[in-house]
Amino acid sequence: MYMSVKELVKDSMDKQTPISELMIQQEMAKNKASREEVWSTMERNLDVMEAAVKRGSEGNGVFSKTGLTGGEAVLLKKYREKGHTLSGDLMMEAVQNAIATNEVNASMGVVCATPTAGSTGTLPGVIFVIKKRLNLDHDQMVRFLFTAGAFGMVIANNAGIAGATGGCQAEVGSASAMGAAAAVEMAGGNAEQSAEALAMAISNLLGLVCDPVAGLVELPCVKRNAIGAGNALISADMALAGLTNKIPADEVISAMDKIGKDLPKALRETGQGGLAATPTGVNMKMRIFGKTVDVGDEN
Amino acid sequence: MSANYRSVFDIIGPVMIGPSSSHTAGAVAIGRAANRIFHAEPTEVVIHYYESFAQTHQGHGTDYAIISGILGFAPDDSRVPDAITIAKKRGIKVTFIEEDGDSPINHPNTAIIELRNADREVTVSGCSIGGGTIEIREIKMDGFDIKPKGPLPILLMQGQADDHHAMSAKLEKLTSINSEATYHAGDGILYEYDLENRLKNQDLDDLAKEHSKLVYL
């Protein structure tokens, strides 16, 4: 099993084999599964992702029970139709898809957690726009997910992917890094460039805290996925242009792990710090659950 | 090092009902583990939450998630959000307790589940480590106090030394055994096998034909 980015990159470069293929082979070997079984499971996951993007952008959109989030993917869609976006239509489509997916998640709809439900919009944000940009076929999109998963496994096994242990950097940061690395492979970059994209994507989001208002996966989670998707595309472009992170990917992952351990409890998915502890955040929690936020003085 | 995430589908997946993979899908998984261990419908369920679970279970739908697992539902079952109502209709008494202290099993996403009926009582301590993946770190059942390392899959078997030798040999053919432990309660012996890979349903059915007291997590 690949336990470091270094091993993944070396094998891919030595064997002249894309990381998506290495991941498929590892999955077949570890779970004694056929290529067809592994492939079709990933296809089903892709279908779920596509359905969530579609659902969040249709009609008036979807809304959570609390009313804290919803309908904003549709606002973006309408805004894009006017053709005056500042950061370009592709970037805003990525943002729309990311937000649509997380709005579906917040409304208790069906999503594919990539790697977590809180960060579930980041990869869809990336994959469906690069599909258009690069004319990816169905098989290439499935491969995108295998590559993203290969890097995600290394991150998860070395640093973790839970907001409660590592903060949002471990969720949206990891998702963004997975998306960046996979986007590089789809654009024809090599494994070393994928690793650079991953390293840059995580480095850009290091220290991001998990401070959900009322403990709900809504504010600020939904829009953090917009940043996750945008950061993935930017990091992939930087890597494809030949930029490097200077600090190697495995060391960046290790830094993320250490930062997560240093974060106070209030900023690790307890809903007690950051935006959750603002006067407005506290009022929202009171309105929804009738409880005050215990901001406490211990970490 | 032992890897918690052993399949690409731990990372790209699970397909689930929102909003949280650790606090919703992971909670379903902890509930399902308790369901497999208890292996019957309980009349009473008490759930103790610690740390992040204690602070945010309401917002994340952890309550209905964990109950749906105890009822045996999958994370993407459409009945998940209605699980508490369903449990109450079936006459199951459900209590949730937000504990103030640190997790006894040392993880911020901890739930300790007590299940009981007229015949039996078990306690299962689980934690949700992210992305829907869980660990089971303590099980109290039938007089045994089992303390697994955490990562799944785990197979538990009550039996004698002969059963153990037979089981080890069979498991070695299907996967590798990362570690084993033996527990005693009176005359009873329980064997724990921490496995590297998940067993296929067919293989599990074959094992269950020859060994009656198995719990697979």
Image (cartoon, coloured by chain):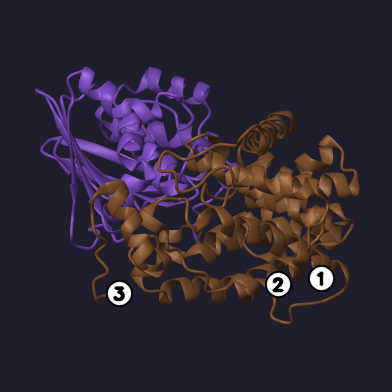
Chain colours: A brown, B purple
Marks 3 and 2 share the same chain = yes
> Farthest residue toward the front?
A82
Q: Give the residue number, with chain letter if any, for mark 1.
A: A238
* Label 3 residue SS: loop
Amino acid type, label 3: Asn
Query: CA separation, marks 3 and 1?
Result: 37 Å
* Label 2 residue SS: helix
Query: CA separation, marks 1 and 2?
Result: 8 Å
Amino acid type, label 1: Met
Residue B10: percent from left, percent from top: 55, 45
Camera sees residue A231: yes
Mark 1 falls within which chain?
A: A
The one nearer the camera, A83 or A143, is A83
The label shown at residue A200 is: 2
Local crowd at mark 1 within 10 Å, few (<14), some, or many (≥20)?
Answer: many
Q: Are marks 3 and 2 in contact (CB under 8 Å)?
A: no
Residue at screen point 37% across, 54% down: A215
Q: Are marks 3 and 1 in contact (CB under 8 Å)?
A: no
Camera sees residue B39: no
Q: Quadrant of the N terminus of chain A?
A: bottom right
Residue B213: percent from left, percent from top: 29, 26
Compared across the picture, whether A221 is left or right of B27 comes to right
Q: Quadrant of residue B163?
A: top left
Residue at screen point 52% across, 47% down: A117
Compared across the picture, whether B214 is left or right of B74 comes to left
Residue at screen point 22% across, 58% down: B104
Q: Quadrant of residue A255?
A: bottom right
